[in-house]
Image (spheres, grey):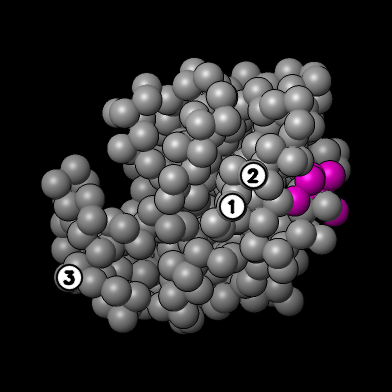
Amino acid sequence: MPRAVTFSRYGGPEVLEVVEVPRPEAGPGEVLVRVVVAGVNPGEAGIRQGVFADMWPAVFPEGQGNDFAGWVAELGDGVGEFAVGDEVIGYMPRAAQADYVVSPAGLLAPKPADISWEAAAPLSAVGVTAWAAVDAVEPTAGDTVVVSGAAGGVGSLAVQLARLRGATVIGTAGPHNADFLRSLGVVPVEHGPGLADRLKAAAPDGIDAFVDTFGQGNVDIAIALGVPPHRINTLADGRAVARYGVRSRAQEDVFTPQLVAELAELVSKGQLAVPISKVYPLEQVQEAYRQVQRRHTRGKIVLSLVPPDDRSAPHA
């Protein structure tokens, strides 16, 4: 039987279970997707822990995961834009970590055949989030942009998207990620105490914009260094939004399947890389979240639902 990740109470990764579920069916205007790879994201851990219970309460047993890539397995009535066997990228909150996902056809983007499943699956979540955060600070040629948490899933894409707009990019991260950031064309600066002084030294002519993916006082530093609030975007510090009036644009503000398709095209052209830290089989979902919650990941962690040596033909 098909499998899905669920949890029946709030808690740590130990509450996650891989259970057998009935195979879903596509209704009118819907597509049934056989998931090949699904993403693993820090925000999903917060939902599972009950951090956002007032805003997004769980309905137990609750599903898990948002972003995925897979094959079209079945078409509902009225769907003409896809065919069975097409490769697609999607976003379905609390449902993606499952062998089968039902999605409205209008929310799916085509997956280019020449990009890997691992690179495709995160684009609808971290890819769109990175695009939203960078677009919010409006980088242009000649600007100097700082990205905090630059080696993480969102950060590693944000630095590349800012560079594509012509900006010089400084990325803050641990010293072990310095060479990785240089490989992306980024000036690495070590995070931690003394960061403001190190940023001044790295950008003696000043910083024009700041993308904060990590929180923990990064916006305070950006303000102290003279970055205008409207050119700061944080994904992790609601207090700073209220205090300074900085921006906080993220995936939910800009998501469209057209944008996902544009990001996939950048990957296909070799203009955007999606660094993958580790691929876990679905059965190791608990360990995947333990790793993500340590917040020291380089790039993305994803779950494989179809083994690599079994991906040559669509599964019904």
Choose mark 2 or mark 3, whichever is in front.
2
The x, y position of residue 139, in whole percent, is 68, 22
> What amino acid type should be assigned to the residue bearing mark 3?
Arg
* CA distance separating discs 1 and 3: 41 Å
Q: Kindly tell me whether residue 150 is visible in this rendering.
A: no
* Figure quadrant of the N terminus: bottom left
Q: Are marks 2 and 1 in contact (CB under 8 Å)?
A: yes
> What amino acid type should be assigned to the residue bearing mark 1?
Gly
> What amino acid type should be assigned to the residue bearing mark 2?
Asp
* Figure quadrant of the C terminus: bottom right
The x, y position of residue 231, in whole percent, is 55, 22
Who's the residue at 31% across and 28% down the image? 243
Disc number at residue 9?
3
Q: Are marks 2 and 3 in contact (CB under 8 Å)?
A: no
Q: Are marks 1 and 3 in contact (CB under 8 Å)?
A: no
283 left or right, relative to 120: left
Who's the residue at 21% across and 59% down the image? 50
> In terms of secondary structure, where does tag 1 sit?
loop
Residue, disc 2 = 197
Magenta stretch holds residue 186: yes
Who's the residue at 43% across and 50% down the image? 216
Question: Dividing the picture into quarters, in which one does residue 261 lie?
Answer: top right
Q: Residues within 10 Å of mark 3 (few under 14, many from 20)?
A: some
* CA distance separating discs 2 and 1: 6 Å
Taking 312 as reference, is 258 above or below it? Answer: above
Who's the residue at 46% across and 79% down the image? 287
Residue, disc 1 = 194
**Residue 186 vs residue 23, the one in the foreground:** 186
Point out the stretch of residues depicted in magenta.
Answer: 183-188
